[in-house]
Each structure stands twice: as C-alpha cells, then as structure tokens.
Amino acid sequence: MEARTLISQLAARARIASRTLSVATTQERRSALLAIADAIELRSNEIVAANEVDMKRGRESGLNSQLLDRLLLTPERIVGIANGARQVSQLEDPLGKTLRQSTLPNGLALKQITVPFGVIGMVYEARPNVTVDAAVILLMSGNAALLRGSSSAASSNAILVDVMRQALSNSSISIDAIQLVPSEDRETVKALLNARGEVDLVIPRGSAALIRMVVDESSVPTIETGAGVCHVYVDEFADLSKALPILINSKTHRPSVCNAAETLLVHKAVAEEFLPIALKALSDAGVVLHGDLASQKVAQSLGIECALATDENWCTEYGVLEMNVGVVDSLDSASEHIAKYGTQHTEAIVSESDASVQRFIALSDCAAVMINTSTRFTDGEQMGFGAEIGISNQKLHARGPMGLEAMTTTTWIVSGNGQIRS
Amino acid sequence: MEARTLISQLAARARIASRTLSVATTQERRSALLAIADAIELRSNEIVAANEVDMKRGRESGLNSQLLDRLLLTPERIVGIANGARQVSQLEDPLGKTLRQSTLPNGLALKQITVPFGVIGMVYEARPNVTVDAAVILLMSGNAALLRGSSSAASSNAILVDVMRQALSNSSISIDAIQLVPSEDRETVKALLNARGEVDLVIPRGSAALIRMVVDESSVPTIETGAGVCHVYVDEFADLSKALPILINSKTHRPSVCNAAETLLVHKAVAEEFLPIALKALSDAGVVLHGDLASQKVAQSLGIECALATDENWCTEYGVLEMNVGVVDSLDSASEHIAKYGTQHTEAIVSESDASVQRFIALSDCAAVMINTSTRFTDGEQMGFGAEIGISNQKLHARGPMGLEAMTTTTWIVSGNGQIRS
C-alpha cells in the first residue's frame, strides 16, 4: 500500500479512537495505564525475545555499543518501563482543567478548559522504551498515538505495541488509540509529516538530524525539541564558592545531554580570582578547553592546554568533556554573547545581586534561566512533572520540559440561556 | 537588495529592538502606546492624504467597493484607530505573569513566567487599520513587529509606520520595534516566511488563500487563523423558543465573518416541530437553503425552495445568506457530522439537558462550544479580551480568539543557592 494511503487509514482509525478517549473518565484512563503496566510485566519474556531479534540484527549491522545499549531491553528495564506507566497513571489529570473563567456583562459564562489534541504522531529513534513512555503519556492526556520508531527496533516495538493494544481491549478505550507506524522505509515518516488535518501534532525525539528533518519537512504542526548550547555566566557579584560546583556540575555531570553547559562566561571583575580555579578544576575533570585570549593567558600560566575559541566553537554543542571559556566586560555583554551563540535552551547566572539576576532574566531569551544552580535541572523529572515527553526548544505552545499538560490544547465553553449578539 | 538579505537586516534590527522592549517597564510600554495614539490623531491630515493616494490607485485598478471601503481611512476612522491604541494601553500587562510555581524537595524555587516571543511578523491584506492594531498589540506584549501589508495600502502603511516610529523616538523603546516590510513584490513575504531563527512567529490575517499560503510556505512557526464552517445543533431536549433566535442570529447577524453559522442540524425528535418554523424564518430572512431529504420535504410542504445539499455544500463556508439544513438521529450523529465537515472553529448546541451538553462538549473538537447561545460570540471583544489579533484555528499554542496573552511565550526561572544535580 502507498505510504500516504496507509497513514490516512491509521490516522482515521486513530481519530475515531480519540473520540473514545475524549469521553473516557480519568479513572478509565488511569486503569488503562495500569493494565498496560501489568501486561508488559506479564509478557516480559516475549518482549525480551523480540528484543533479542533486534539486538542480533543490530550487532550484525555493526551498531556501536552506545546504540546497542539504548536498544537493549532486559527484564529489569522492562519492570522499569512498567513502573513508569504506573507512575504516569498517578499524575494529576491534565484534562478538563479550567484555565480561565469569567461572566460577561450579558450573562454569558465563559470558561477555557484543557482538552486533548486528538491524534499525535511521535517520530523517534532506536529506543524501544520511548514506545511505551510516549504511548502512556499521550493516552493519559487523552490523545491517540501514532508511533513511528526506528526500523532497528522494529521487532521490540511490534511486541510492545501489541501488548499495549491487547491491554486496552478490555477497556472503554479503542485499541486504535495506540498504533505502530511501519518503519521499513522513510516514506511512512514523510506521509506522517504531511498528514495535515489528519494528525494534529508531530513530536520528534532523538538526534539533532532527526529533529531538523521533522521541522523542515512537516506541514503538520510540530514541537521542536533538542539542541542546547547552554551557558554558565559568573557575574561580578557571584559567590565564587557556589560558582565552581555549579560550573563543574553543569559541564561534567552528564555531558551528552542537551542541558549540559558548553560555555563559561566570566565577568572581568572576578576573572582574575575565578578563572585560575575554574580552569584548573575543569582540566582536572578532563575537560578540553577553548578560550578567548584572556582565558588562554590564564590557562598558559597554569600550564593547561587551551586552544583559541573560534566562532564555530562558541556555537557547538559538544556533548562531551569540552568547553569554551570567555571573559566579558559586563552582564549585558554576556547576554549579547548568549543571544548570538546560544540555542535558547538553558542559561545560568551565578550572582548574589538581585539587580543582576533580574536584568539577566529580562535579557535572556530561553526556555529556562538558572539562578545560582546547575543547568542540569532543566528536566521534567527534576522539575517535578513526573514524566517528560521531551524538552521543547521552541516558543510556540510549550517551552522547556513538557509533561502531560503540554500534550493538551484548550477550548472555550460559552454558556448562555438564549443570548444573541446585537 | 535581495529580499532574503533585506528581511535578515530588518529582523536583526527588530531583535535588538526587542531587547529594549524586554527591559521596558509596563508603564514605558503603556506610554509608548499613548504617544502613538496622540501622534496618529495629530497627523490625521497627513494620513488621510497618504490614504487618498492608495484610494486613487485602488479605484483606477478597479478594486471593488467592499475592498475600497476596507482601504479607506477617514478622520473619524483615524480617531477610532487611535482610541483602539489607548484601549490596549489600559489592558492588563500580559508580561511577567507567574503561571505556575513550586518549591522542589532540594529547595529550588521553580516559577514559570510569561515573556515576549521577541520578533513577530504580520502578513495581512489591504486594511491599513491592521497596521496600527497589530503594532500596538505586539508592542504591549513586548514584541517587535515586522509588518507586511498589501501593496495596495503601501502609502497608508508607510505614513502610519512613520508616525508610530516617530512616537517611539522619545521613549526607551527602539523605533525598530515597529518596521514596515516593503510590499512591492511577493519575494519579501517568502523571505519573511523563511526567516526561521530570525523571526519567532508569523501571523497571517486575511483571506483563506492568504492564510493557506502562509501555512504552506512558512518554515517560521505560524498561527493559522480563519475559516469557520460553524454548526448550530438543536438537541432533542432543546428549548425551541431559544433555538430560533440563536439560529437566526448565528446565520444572519453578519454572514461574512468566520463565526457565522453555515449548517443547522436538528435532532429527529424535534424536527417535526422545529423545522417548519426554522425554515420559514430563515427563508423570510433571505437565506438560500440546501437540505437533506427530510428537510427538503418540509421546505416543499411550505413552498420554500431548498436544493439537495451535496458533500461540497456541507463543507462550504458560504459567507453569505446561504445555509445547509440536516436532520440527525442522535447527538452522536450530529457530532460525527461536525467532525466530518466542520473546521474546528465554533459549534453551538441548544439543549436544556446537562447530559447532552456535556457529551457534546466532550465530542466537539473545536475552538469554542456555544451552549444555548449564538456562534457569533467567538470574538475577542465579545469575550472581554479588549483587543484581538485574530482567531486561532489551530490547536498548538492558542485556540480561538487571541488577545495580548496569546502573544507571549514562557520561561522557567529556577532559583537556588548553589544546588547541583547528583
């Protein structure tokens, strides 16, 4: 079947299923998630066996160890996935919340409430846990899910979706609320991205290349997730004893993720005191350095290698133990540097001055501003959302970590007793 | 200059200007709007003269009377535009509002606040009032505006933007917060729509064709505004004495706008009683009818003309005194009809049954549900927003009438005293 036709059929079924979700109660959605969790644990052996097929193919096709590790499902990991679903089932229901209400002079009662999007497509890579994580978040927020994972996880995804659909078969929710989009070729992704009007939203989750592709090719509305060139700015009024652990944590705690810091900017008033201890600590932690002239000079005096940072360096999301260091004349200069090279993800300021903090906030155009704390806290779990479907790197609709609420839209309910417009 | 380069330059200036808006106080933004209002009134003669150039060209090129009326600026209309700006200046500041806050177990204080988008492009047609209306809403919400109007209003737009920029020149806000995008050719629109990363959001306002073009061609995030195939559903539990005025008001009060109704659906249980009075009243009001077989039969018995409604009729936004009429077996059938043919704008139910109303709400996938009231109330002014930049017809970010708040995004402020992630 042609990919376009296939996606239209899946989306049409998902749309009908989404209507069963719209009328399902909170308790019915919670129960569905619990049934999914139980079914996943119960059929753990089958899931492991299906995953072994993917792992074998992965090893044969030469996937590197990091990718193989992401692909792997063990009995322990399966329990973790099931518990994740149970956790989501206990979160506050994001649907039917009243966001605003008022009574108009003509007596009309106005209320804005949260409702599901309807049909949401997920496009992701070879992490079979995302298949369940995403499905349960979408289900709990009342949305039907079209899941397009990677062909290298095809066997794992097929069994997981089968298990979840079967768990739904005893509920009021249609099994078509969870559907797997075939992953043999790229045509199904293209068709999904262009099913405008049939699919309400597509969310990419994975590498920068995947996200870019989705954003560029999609006519369906998307939420861009991803890239983070995050900065730590040490202000002239910084408590340097806080600045050092914040810097080291931001850079080295988990350098591969998007909320890790890539650049340190130090106000010139504290550079002489802070740079030597900062560069020494970074170097001791194995961080490769790129600096402006002032930082290079300090590094040289300590016998630490530090290449001259290029424009390309300042823009780079290293993802490894590598960092840029610069000295700035003022908070405004730091902020201009960030505006020029940042990706509007997370920016941290270390300062004891409220005036500095407020100005940094006003001048920062990003998803999260960290004040005297590590950039690593831009994270749904850490922020107490209980579940995260991704971190939005755009300004429309959702910004920063997205939990259940970000998967809802709104509708206005206007109640009257016969009012007409004059 | 090449359009792409030109737009990049305008956007870069707008970005710098947006930083002056980010740090401007509420009072500074309010004062800027009042200064704009005063300047517009003060230079009314100049504006009228510039408008006469557009009007003359419009008449010569054969614009129809409706388009010429939209283009026309009279001294009275200019006062109206200035008063509109004054009104927006008095609205509640949409910036810096705390949407959510909490304290995490590790002591971090979490706060989600509203902030401006940054740079917003408006693409619209030959209505010079939009030039000021949009600019003041964007300014009040802290955004720099790139205004791309129609070439047929070029002279009017040029003077209005000049007046507004001059009014800003005595404020802390950069004059580049308001810029006119040249309208000689379509290349500037294309360039604006593809300035991803330079422009944060593009909003189209105008005809369905304009909106479609923007949505299709834009790689910058957009908010789709527009089309409305709205329904009035008369339930089996309707108070028919309310149903009739609601129907007539929804269809005939102002048929050219998007919140006018196009289709009447009547539950079979009340069809026999309601259809004759409804069809008679519609016909008396000059409404041309298209009906299903049941409705046709009733119309014929009354000697009223009623063509058989085709699939195309059910999908059509007439914009004139023309309406489809159908009889449905149940509320669910009505809702399925609406799901199939509607545009997710506004759907009305007339019913005294709370169960019917709640089910209709749950099954309606639209921006606004009207309960026992006219579809015409989906409107920013009517809903008490004080100003409206358009009606969003999409689910992402904003749905329904958009006021100042819809022109903001959010940022997370995370305050600590040295916390790091372990």
Image (cartoon, coloured by chain):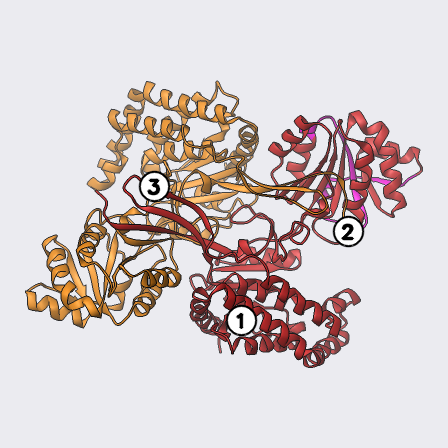
Chain colours: A red, B orange
Provide the residue designation for mark 1.
A178
Query: Which segment did they paint magenta?
Result: A304-333
Q: Dividing the picture into quarters, in which one does residue B48 lie? A: top left
Under circle 2, the secondary element is: loop
Provide the residue designation for mark 2.
A255
Under circle 1, the secondary element is: strand
Provide the residue designation for mark 3.
B125
Chain ID for label 1?
A
Neighbor class of circle 3 (other Cα within 10 Å; few <14, some 14-19, many 20+) is many
Asked if residue A254 is among those painted magenta in the image, a careful observer would answer no
Classify residue B326 as left or right of residue B88: left
Do pointers 2 and 1 mark residues of a single chain? yes
Q: Residue at x 37, y 41 (%)?
A: B124
Chain ID for label 3?
B
Q: Nearer the viewer, residue A248 or A172?
A: A172
Any part of residue B308 in sight = no
